Amino acid sequence: MNDITVLICEGCDIALSVDVAALVRTAKEQTGVTQVQAVPCLCNDQGQACIRECTAVEGKSLVLAACSSRFVPLAVGADANAVERVALREFAAWSHEPNQEETQAIAQDYLRMGLVRAAKSDLPVPELLEVARRILIVGAGPTYCRPAHLTGTWKIPGSRRC
């Protein structure tokens, strides 16, 4: 996918630990990124509305640079869009010293990795399998009789009815 929107959360001490403006510049430099926006908080109603607005257009990839998906499962309409999460809070803001060059480099690297994952991924296409109407029941006694009775498959020559 080449049409990537990036939302960067500033909440949960992310903006206090890394330079969000530098993250916005890093995202804009990447191929395929069409929109980058820093949002004060993706968890609140305003942030959720921003996510819904970005996922309203089909065929776009959405990169959410915020917290881990384990902590806050954001309500994204991922049916028609690929959504990639980058856990800046856990991997940079909370695990490294704030406002250090190394912390900023780590945050930018994780953002770049998330952008590459979004660029190289496609929505899964369901594979429709052919359904066979026949089953094989192996066993004797109750193991055979119950499924055979339920499915009506005891028409095997030489077998007795249960």
Image: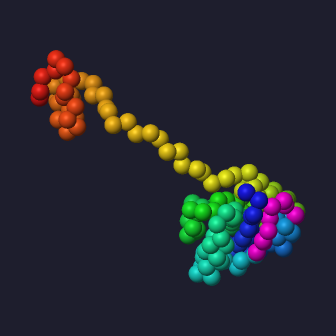
Q: Position of residue 18 (x, y in %)?
A: 80, 69
Q: Position of residue 155 (x, y in %)?
A: 19, 27
Q: Quadrant of residue 107?
A: bottom right
Q: Is residue 12 left or right of residue 45?
A: right
Quick check: 139 above or below 101?
Answer: above
Residue drawn at (20%, 39%) of the image: 150
Judge by depth and name the residue closer to the eye, 109 or 89.
109
Quick check: 33 above or below 54?
Answer: above
Quick check: 55 above or below 118?
Answer: below
Asked whether the viewer can see residue 84, the reply is yes
Residue extending furthest toward the bottom: 46
Magenta span contains residue 34: yes
Question: Which stretch did the figure color magenta?
Answer: 29-37
Quick check: 118 above or below 40?
Answer: above
Residue drawn at (65%, 70%) of the image: 57
Q: Quadrant of residue 63?
A: bottom right
